Amino acid sequence: MEPLTLYAPAKVNLTLTVGDRRPDGYHDVSTVMQAVSLYDTLILTHGGAGLTLTCTDPAVPSDATNLVLRAAGRFFKETKLPVPDLHLHLRKRIPSQAGLGGGSSDAASTLLALRTLYAPSLPDVQLEHMAAALGSDVPFFIRGGTALARGRGERLTPMPRLRDGWFVIVKPPEGFSTPAMYRRLDDLSPEPPRPDAMPAALAAEDIRAVAAALYNSFERAVPPDSAVWDIESALRAHGALAALLSGSGSAVFGLFPRGHCPRRRRDPAGALAHDICGPTCIKSENTVQNAGKFLHRTVFLCVNSIPLSWHCCWRWPPHCSGEHGPSAGRTICRPK
C-alpha cells in the first residue's frame, strides 16, 4: 500500500459562549468554529507490529494516551475489524495549549484515514459518534469548514463559509490549560445572555459584521498581565478588523479584510511579527481545499520569548501579490 497522507487543520472560534457546568462535568457551549489552513500532517503506512505512532514533536507522547492511537483503537473496536499492522506518523505544526484544536483534529483525521483504508462505506454519522467519544471538538473536524456547535460541542449545524478576508494567528510563549480556564470561568459571576449575530453575518458575507460579532467567554478568564492583550492590540494596530482569543487560548487571531497587508511592503509578515513581539517563527498557508472542505487562509506566528534575531519561513497569500513583487506566493526562508 502506498502511504496515505491527510491534513489535520486547526480551527479558530469565531464565537464561543460558555454556559453553566453540567452534572456530567462538561459545560454547555455555543460556538461557531472555522477550519483554517494551519495544519498537522498524518501519514499512514503498513508495517510494524500492530498500531504504532511516531511524532516530529518530542513533547507529544507517542503512547496509548495520544488521541491518534485512541482514535485508531476506537475505530477498530466499534467496527469490529481486525487491527492491522499500521504505522502512523504525525508531523506537528499546530501548537498545544493554544485553543486551536490540534489534538482533536489529529484524532478526526485518524478516523477519516482509517475509514478510507478499511471501511469506505462507513457513514459520517457513525464516524461522528466515534469522534464525540474522543473529545468535544473532534466531531467538528470530521466535517470541517464552518459550523455552529452546541451541547458540549458535539451537536453540529453547518454554517455559510467565511469567504472573505484572512487570519493572522499568534501563539504567545505561555499556554493555557483548558481545564484551568474552565475553572477560572466557574469562579466568575455568570455572564448575561447575549444574542449571537454571527450566523446572520456569515450568511450576509459581510466581513465587517463578522468582525463585530466575534466573541469568546474565555477572555473573561485571561489574566490581566497576559501577553494576549498586547497581541490583540498589536493586531488591531496593524489593520485587523478585530482580534480575539481562540478557544481557551492562548493563541489569538486577527481578522483582516481582503487585500489588506500589514505595513512595510517589502516584508509585511516580518514587520508584523517584529512589531508584535520581536523574535518570531512564521508559518503561513493559502486558502486550501482538504478533502472537499475549505480551510480559510491563515498566517501563523509562533512567538519566542527570547530576544534573538528572528527568523521566518513563510509564503504570502496570493491576493497580496502585485505591490509585494516577487515574494508573493513563494516560500522564503531566512536563517537566524
Image: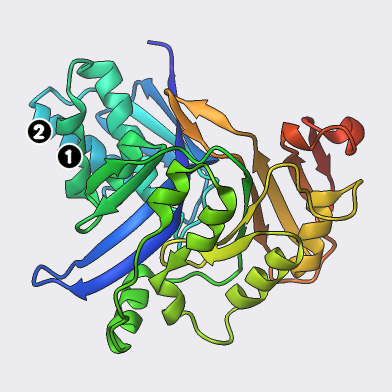
Among the two numbered marks 2 and 1 on one chain, the one whose residue lies closer to the N terminus:
2
Which residue ends up furthest to the top in the rendered image?
A: 1
Is disc 2 placed on a helix, strand or loop? helix
Task: Residue 312: give its label.
Answer: none
| CB contact under 8 Å: marks 2 and 1 | yes
Residue at the spot of label 1:
130
Image height of 206 relative to 214, above or below: above
The answer to which image quadrant residue 177 occupies is: bottom left
Label 1: how many residues lie within 10 Å, few (<14), some (14-19) or many (20+)?
some
In the rendered image, residue 186, in percent from the top left (x then y), is placed at 27, 83
| Residue beneath the point at 13% across and 71% down | 22
| Residue beneath the point at 72% across and 69% down | 234
Is disc 1 placed on a helix, strand or loop? helix
In the rendered image, residue 219, in percent from the top left (x then y), is placed at 46, 75
Residue type at tag 1? Met
> Which sits in the foreground, 73 or 254?
254
The answer to which image quadrant residue 309 occupies is: bottom right
| Residue beneath the point at 74% across and 31% down | 318
Residue type at tag 2? Glu
Task: Residue 78: give its label.
Answer: 2
Report the label total: 2
In the rendered image, residue 256, in percent from the top left (x then y), is placed at 66, 52
Q: Is residue 103 visible?
A: yes
Q: CA distance from mark 2 to mark 1?
A: 8 Å
| Residue beneath the point at 23% across and 16% down | 120
Image height of 275 relative to 226, above or below: above
Name the mark nearer the viewer: 2 or 1: 1
Label 2: how many residues lie within 10 Å, few (<14), some (14-19) or many (20+)?
few
Image height of 321 relative to 221, above or below: above
